[in-house]
Image (cartoon, rainbow, N blue to C red):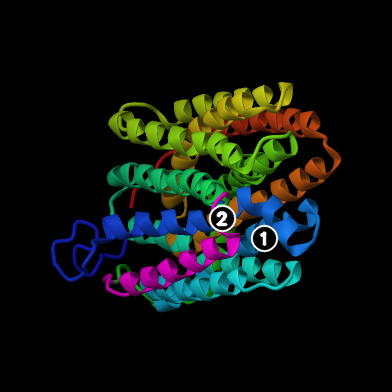
């Protein structure tokens, strides 16, 4: 493994104003906020722009699709430029895209702006995972991944809850303006971080060829895509589903914020036991929690069931996704930048697929079918991930 130039994570040299161990999880939080801010705002945006809720919800799907597909560009750039330069450029572009969203005169421009924002933030997750993978030994990565899971969950929870609350007092356009300004400041902060790992030592094509032949890396990405369908794609539509069932925007944001609370609590508890429990047991528990969450939602949609269901899905994300991230940093250790890019692409392609299927279900009011199908898929996710992880042997670096 390439050695970092300076203790970027521990912060031994006092070069950056904020150490990478703090700033990079904050960056993950902020990029996740970009995805979740709009969720409770969809009905209000539709009314303001004179369109249907289903068409306004397309902005969620195209954002997820761009997030997935544009990583094909950001992954090779991360290998050539380095992780920090990619993060600075992509975060700056995201700031511009959100400013454009705030000024959108119609739904077409809003969808374009949200798609651009998703494509810009596509660089964030893989670059941060690769940074920590390069800078930390395998034994220390689970703790870092738990912190990233916490950051992601806080982004989901605070995004839905805050925008849901603010939407009752201020315009959705004002929310995007403030977000764009802070995103620009985030890009400036990222520019102070030192680089880690090697850049441009080996071409992208040889690495890609080696990654394609890595059956474990491909298998982990396949399971991750199914996770994205369920725990991002379908989950993201819960605020819309709850509002369609008669709840207001604030209640919708508050109920789904339970997901983030559950992830924060469980992921931090995981740090206490991760070295003493086999990864397969995290998949067992995560799969069971996901099945239970979707079954609760299939029975009935109201604030209480969404609260309980979102909590179960948050537990599933904390247990399963954190374990998948750590697994992938090891399975693709010889092509980590491209490997983590493929991992994130798989997750977000699954999210786009889940969001598209969920949008159709929302438009037709077919909530029970959506959630029963999701429960069956969650059972498959748990069984397959447990079987695969039992056969895998850690490589180390």
Is residue 135 at least partly visible in the picture? no
Q: Secondary structure at mark 2?
A: helix
Residue 158 drawn above or below residue 372: below
Measure how far apart labels 1 and 2 are at the Cα level.
Answer: 12 Å
Q: Please provide percent x and percent y for residue 222.
A: 63, 46
Q: Please provide percent x and percent y for residue 63.
A: 64, 61
- Residue 184 is a magenta residue: yes
Q: In front: 395, or 110?
A: 110
> What is the crowding at mark 2: few (fewer than 14 residues within 10 Å), some, or many (at least 20)?
many
- Hey, which quadrant is residue 67 in on the image? bottom right
Q: Mark 1 near mark 2, Cβ–Cβ under 8 Å?
A: no
Residue extent of the magenta highlight: 168-194
In the rendered structure, which disc, 1 or 2, sits on the residue that comes first in sequence? 2
Rendered residue at 75%/50% (across/down): 356
Q: In front: 385, or 96?
A: 96
Q: Please provide percent x and percent y for residue 131.
A: 36, 61
Main secondary structure found in the magenta portion = helix
Q: What number of labels is visible?
A: 2
Q: Please provide percent x and percent y for residue 343.
A: 54, 54
Residue 331 drawn above or below residue 286: below
Name the residue that disc number 1 marks.
Answer: 65
Residue 29 drawn above or below residue 266: below
Relative to residue 204, is residue 366 drawn left or right?
right
Residue 75 drawn above or below residue 368: below
Which quadrant: the N terminus? bottom left
- Residue 80 is a magenta residue: no
Name the residue that disc number 2 marks.
Answer: 35
Rendered residue at 68%/53% (across/down): 44
Q: In front: 207, or 283?
A: 283
């Amino acid at each position: 493994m390439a050695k970092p130039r300076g203790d970027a994570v521990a912060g031994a040299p006092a070069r950056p104003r904020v150490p990478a161990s703090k700033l990079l999880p904050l960056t993950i939080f902020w990029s996740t906020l970009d995805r979740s801010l709009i969720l409770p705002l969809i009905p209000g945006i539709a009314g303001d722009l004179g369109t249907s809720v289903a068409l306004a919800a397309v902005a969620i799907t195209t954002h997820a699709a761009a997030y997935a597909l544009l990583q094909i560009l950001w992954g090779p750039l991360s290998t050539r430029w380095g992780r920090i330069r990619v993060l600075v450029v992509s975060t700056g572009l995201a700031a511009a895209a959100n400013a454009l969203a705030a000024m959108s005169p119609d739904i077409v421009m809003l969808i374009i702006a949200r798609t651009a924002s998703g494509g810009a933030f596509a660089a964030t997750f893989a670059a941060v995972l690769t940074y920590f993978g390069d800078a930390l030994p395998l034994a220390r990565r689970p703790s870092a991944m738990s912190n990233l899971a916490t950051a992601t969950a806080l982004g989901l929870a605070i995004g839905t809850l805050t925008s849901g609350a603010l939407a009752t007092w201020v315009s959705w356009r004002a929310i995007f303006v403030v977000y764009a300004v802070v995103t620009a400041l985030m890009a400036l902060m990222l520019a102070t971080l030192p680089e880690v790992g090697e850049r441009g030592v080996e071409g992208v094509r040889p690495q890609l060829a080696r990654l394609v032949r890595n059956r474990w890396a491909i298998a982990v990405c396949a399971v991750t895509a199914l996770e994205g369908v369920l725990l991002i794609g379908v989950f993201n539509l819960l605020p819309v589903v709850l509002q369609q069932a008669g709840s207001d925007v604030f209640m919708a944001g508050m109920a789904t914020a339970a997901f983030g609370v559950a992830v924060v609590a469980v992921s931090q508890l995981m740090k206490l036991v991760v070295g003493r429990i086999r990864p397969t047991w995290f998949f067992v528990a995560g799969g069971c929690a996901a099945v239970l969450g979707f079954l609760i939602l299939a029975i009935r949609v109201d604030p209480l069931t969404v609260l309980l269901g979102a909590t179960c899905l948050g537990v599933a994300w904390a247990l399963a996704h954190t374990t998948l991230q750590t697994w992938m940093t090891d399975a693709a250790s010889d092509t980590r930048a491209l490997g983590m890019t493929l991992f994130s692409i798989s997750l977000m392609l699954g999210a786009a697929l889940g969001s598209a299927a969920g949008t159709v279900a929302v438009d037709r009011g077919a909530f029970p079918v959506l959630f029963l199908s999701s429960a069956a898929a969650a059972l498959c996710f748990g069984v397959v991930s447990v079987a695969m992880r039992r056969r895998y042997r850690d490589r180390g670096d």
